[in-house]
Image: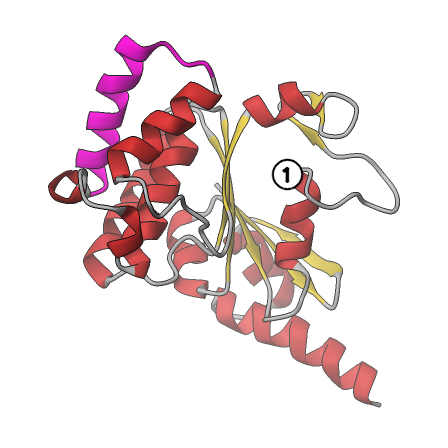
Amino acid sequence: VFGFLGPNGAGKTTTIKMIVGLLRPTAGRVIVAGHDVWADPLAAKAAFGYVPDRSLLYERLTGVEYLQFLAQMRSLPQDETDQEIEYLLDLLDLAPHAHKLSGAYSFGMKRKLALAGALLHRPPVLILDEPLNGLDPRSARRLKDLLIDLAAQGKTIFLSTHDLHTAESVCHRVGIIHQGQLMAEGSAEELRTLAAVPDLESVFLSLTEETSSEVSA
């Protein structure tokens, strides 16, 4: 699990949009699971599941219908898909609401349905933009546990967040971005040692405040 940390407006979502092929970078290449996002977009996009910071659903479809629609769009085998949909809805506590219109879902439920859609085709890479936003504490805890389990199964997870506790408890490595620049990257322990501070919060504040002070000066 790679945690992508930064204050609001630092460039987290912009970076993610470049990774998933929604925004073309002005320089360099984006490679996901060995595939160039721009030179081979179909292969690259088949290799990842993506949950944006604002989940856009077809709100006139039920939760089940939405996932079935995604499965058809990806040409997934129906017999396997039905089992996977049932599993994901149960895993994310959406089973009681599976046949309700997604437009009636709470914000947190919509986030979980979007995550189910991202997991449906069992991609090796997950790209999640602020996935804990809008989740109640119980759902947030279950999602953290799920991310840890998925990583243990071999999935690569790119997770943007401003929640330092989540980054420290879930992520194996973190990168701190500020004003469009990657300020530091490494494990939480490596960054604490490098900055000679006791916790990741102190590392984050040190890097972002120093840069802001330099710009103001």
Report the side of 191 relative to 26 (left or right): left
Viewer-side residue, 75 vs 52 = 75
Q: Is residue 77 magenta?
A: yes
Q: Where does the image place residue 212, in percent across and percent down from the top left?
A: 73, 81
Residue at the image position 68 percent from the left and 57 percent from the top: 184
Report the side of 106 relative to 154 (left or right): left
Residue at the image position 59 percent from the left and 71 percent from the top: 8
- Residue 133 in view (yes/no): yes
Residue extending farthest front: 60
Q: Where does the image place residue 49, in percent across and percent down from the top left?
A: 49, 33
Placement of 72 over or under 112, stated as above or below: above
Q: Which residues are magenta?
A: 75-93
Report the side of 15 relative to 49 (left or right): right
Give the quadrant of the C terminus: bottom right
By what rule are the colours in the image chosen?
Answer: secondary structure
User: How many numbered discs?
Assistant: 1
Viewer-side residue, 156 vs 120 = 120
